[in-house]
Amino acid sequence: MEPSADSKRATLAQVAELAGVSVMTASYTYNQPDRVSDRARSKVLDAAARLGYAGPDPSARSLRRGSTRTLGVVMGEHLSYAFEDPEAVSFLAGIADVCAERGYGMTILPITGDADDVPRITAAAVDGFIVWTTSDDDPVLAAVQAMKRPAVVHGGPAVRGMGLVGIDNRAAAHAVGAVAFADARRPAVVSFPLSRERVSTIVGGAGLADVLFPVTRERLAGYRQAAEDAGIAWRDVVVAVCARNDAAEAERVVATMLASAEPPDAIAAMSDQQAAGAVNAIRAAGLVIPDDVAVTGWDDAAVAAELGLTTVAQSLREQGAACAHAALGGNPDSQTAPWSVVRRTSTRR
Amino acid sequence: MEPSADSKRATLAQVAELAGVSVMTASYTYNQPDRVSDRARSKVLDAAARLGYAGPDPSARSLRRGSTRTLGVVMGEHLSYAFEDPEAVSFLAGIADVCAERGYGMTILPITGDADDVPRITAAAVDGFIVWTTSDDDPVLAAVQAMKRPAVVHGGPAVRGMGLVGIDNRAAAHAVGAVAFADARRPAVVSFPLSRERVSTIVGGAGLADVLFPVTRERLAGYRQAAEDAGIAWRDVVVAVCARNDAAEAERVVATMLASAEPPDAIAAMSDQQAAGAVNAIRAAGLVIPDDVAVTGWDDAAVAAELGLTTVAQSLREQGAACAHAALGGNPDSQTAPWSVVRRTSTRR
DNA sequence: AGCCATATGTGTAACGATACACAAGCCCGC
DNA sequence: GCGGGCTTGTGTATCGTTACACATATGGCT
């Protein structure tokens, strides 16, 4: 027996014929019901019901109308990661809020980091794009740009013709870094990856070559400023680069740093998850926060409040919503989001 | 100045003309590059580059091909909630894994719970649907069914012609309930909502009228069996219905129960988040777990391990992936997922 | 040379819907 | 009785692409 999924979908023409009206009358019945008489409308709806017609075909409608009422979202280099990062999820929630409100669909594009990503972007039937923070050289960005549709980048990089939504990462890093590095003699940074290769390393600040992720680059610059304000040369600041943004890797890398000859006495991380990993490593080493080691995070996630982390508060949900508004607006402009430093007990003063 | 988003997209016909080849040659260049000589291919690609042609229009292609290479996902009654529930997010991650692997897009449909939901489903340009657990009477389900495309429901209800993926909730509830209610004299249940109205109430088990969410209904049935096995009548079991699945509301409702004349000495919840709220309330009341009150959760989320919660382990990520496979398979069949009871320290034996 | 198999190019007809312009019917007021 | 405006119905062209069938060129083989 044929399952319902296989029975062919009826067309508007068939409905119109069965109803004894023209195709246009049937079309108007769905799109401008007031444009047709009650009698005609019910004839059409009856016929539709009889044929099991579920409404105009979305692809045909999109082609004819030139709009899909759907927003495309590109989340990082591999789609799966998007759902593992709670901050990315709240960014998605912000987009979802706006999409739901405006009746737009939200298509998450299947990026995997391989060469087929470009055709995947190209094949996306969407009216606009939102791109989650990526690197300067991400080919996906060029592909999005080529699509000639409204597009907004979150975080960075800035791209000609696309909107940009995000906070002033350098200023925020400078501010939270000042708190983290207060009274510190050997500050350290736990960083996001520097390039799309995502290798983990521990280097002195001076050892950082090209940082291709603008968000990471800006935050490092802010931390550097904070360190130098505290009288410490950037080359003396240890930067631990974590390939993944999670607590486990940060814990491992911080444990390594703590076991070194010159362990850090202040650690500025780039997410609360990393900071949480740092807290675990510090406690496991029998050290006290903030006396032995001060720690700061980023994002003001739930875990930050639980652990008493000093952190940078920002609302990714609101930023997601701002991206969606900008992308739907048709002519995306840029927008700088607010942030603030939340002081808790993981820092000295 | 016109932003790039406004410059009209070129068409394949224009590309073909500029390249001096037929439209079909241009089309083959994109779809079956091997079908075309190197010379023709590069002529086409040159022309495309010159015109800024980004590839075949997705809507036109979908119409012609009859497939969108996109999966539609319906998450609950309001899209925003989906991203607030970590288990729902890991379900999405499972779908995303499969979509990324197969190069499919994943469209999250903008359900809001109002009357416009049906046209929103109807307007979705997708090849198949995945529906997150809902109620028997959800109009969205009927709309999905009317679309005559492969569809899979997660959790329930079972719908003719659609696949069903999930665990045996009744059996799992029976099993974990047996552990929760061991040696208990006044067991209680913290439940998900019973109907789409989502009202919070505290009632005796007998007071439960129609439970329209199949997952909730099955779990309640399992808990009932467990209570009766322990020699306690269902009408004597207090069921606290929480409108939302979060720790805060569960904490409030459990605090109320604990303050009553006959406080429960065992609480079986329907999620680890609810159980975590229960733990907070119990500790705040100065009681000891599991001696004074035993607690069980559901899902084996991170918080369950942290709190030592006895719980039902299931992998929503794998179930999401199973749904996606089934929906992409074309002829979705049903599939029962595995579960197990994880015993920790929140129960007596 | 003759023949067939393969490689490459092209024209036409859909896919299913909607924009637009026009036509017919109707009611109203003067 | 007649013109003007409103309502309601219809035909046709078009959105941009790809499936299909066919035509032509190419090369290898006997």
Image (cartoon, coloured by chain):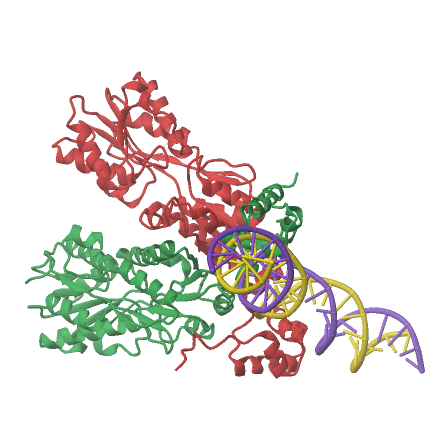
Chain colours: A red, B green, C yellow, D purple
Question: Does residue D30 appear to the left or right of B57 in the view shown?
Answer: left
The image quarter containing residue A291 is top left
Residue A140 horizontal/vertical position (percent): 46, 43
What residue is shown at x 18% (from left), y 72% (from top)? B171
Residue B322 horizontal/vertical position (percent): 30, 64
Residue A127 horizontal/vertical position (percent): 54, 53
Can residue B262 be seen at all in this image of the molecule? no
Q: Identify which residue, B151 or A239, lies in the foreground.
A: B151
Measured along the vertical axis of the image, is residue A191 above or below residue B182?
A: above
Question: Does residue A59 appear to the left or right of D11 in the view shown?
Answer: left
In the picture, the quarter occupied by the C terminus of chain A is top left
Measured along the vertical axis of the image, is residue A182 above or below residue B231?
A: above
Can residue A166 be seen at all in this image of the molecule? yes
What residue is shown at x 53% (from left), y 50% (from top)? A128
Q: Identify which residue, B10 or A127, lies in the foreground.
A: B10
Residue B251 horizontal/vertical position (percent): 23, 57
In the picture, the quarter occupied by the N terminus of chain A is bottom left
